[in-house]
Amino acid sequence: MLRLAGLEKSFGSGAPLIAGADLEVAAGEWVAIVGESGSGKSTLLNVIAGLDRPDRGEVLLEGRALDYGDDDALALWRRRHVGFVFQSFHLLPYLSVAENVALPLALLGVAAGERRSRAAQGLASVGLAGFGDRKPATLSGGEMQRAAIARALIHRPRLLLADEPTGNLDAANAAAVLDCLAAAVRQANAAALMVTHSPVAAGRADRVLRLAAGTLAP
């Protein structure tokens, strides 16, 4: 599903953060990447998502390489094919929970009725049935992250990228979110890539790789 081939990325004249990374992630597979702060984990996600351009190498999704030369095409590609889960949730406070979850569908021009139906289904799938009319500020941290997972998957992306998804949660909420994330990846049959400092979170993935000195290794 996802393939990285000889990916390289540097900033300035220093040593490359990513130096010839190669990786394959199958549909329905959840891969965790661990490493020290500043090792390039978030940079790797940004390159895979087309937010940063690699110096060399390719990112391929379902066999098709990203074209980093067209910003508009990259934005549309992300909108259609990529789901994001962030450490800080990034739910819009002035929208209801359901409206937040449905936002990717609104950006794709999906009709309002279908948006509402799919948002309700998505919230139910993460244990938040009946929460749609509430505002994000009324949710706990774990509930906000589960809503963010529903939002990340509502448009049925082929690729799910998670950046420290349990970083702001206590142990109990983190465990619930990881359960939710594992189930969501299987149900969506998406390729999932998570970067994390947490050995507990990494241990829930199907495979764990370490990013060090610019290279990925088991």
Image (cartoon, helix red, strand yellow):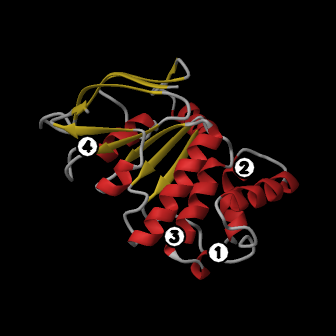
Check disc 2 and give the amino acid type: Leu
Q: Residues within 10 Å of mark 2 (few under 14, many from 20)?
A: many
Residue at the disc numbered 3: 142
Residue plotted at (57% across, 66% down)? 91
14 up-or-down from 112: above or below? above
Element at badge 3?
helix
Q: Secondary structure at mark 2?
A: helix
Residue 84, above or below 70 = below
Residue 59 is drawn in which quadrant? top left
Amino acid tagged 1: Tyr
State the separation of the CA atoms marked 3 and 4: 26 Å
Q: Which residue is mark 2?
A: 105
Which of the image's four quarters has the C terminus? top left
Q: Residue furthest right?
A: 113
For the residues bearing labels 3 and 2, Cβ distance under 8 angstroms: no
The CA span between labels 4 and 1 is 33 Å
Q: Residue 129 at x, y = what percent?
A: 73, 67
- Which mark is on residue 40? 4
Question: Counting other residues with Cα less than 10 Å from the Cα at mark 3, is it few (<14), some (14-19), or many (20 or more)?
Answer: many
Q: Is residue 138 left or right of residue 71?
A: right
- The amino acid marked with disc number 4 is Gly
Q: Is residue 188 visible?
A: yes
**Quadrant of residue 149 in the image?**
bottom right
Q: Earlier in the sequence, mark 2 or mark 1?
A: 1
> Could you tell me which secondary element the residue under label 1 belongs to?
loop
Q: Earlier in the sequence, mark 3 or mark 4?
A: 4
Which of labels 1 and 3 is toward the front?
Answer: 3
Q: Kindly tell me whether residue 89 is visible in this rendering.
A: no
Front residue of 182 and 107: 182
Point out the residue furthest to the top here: 63
- Where does the image place residue 210, in percent across and percent down from the top left? 25, 39
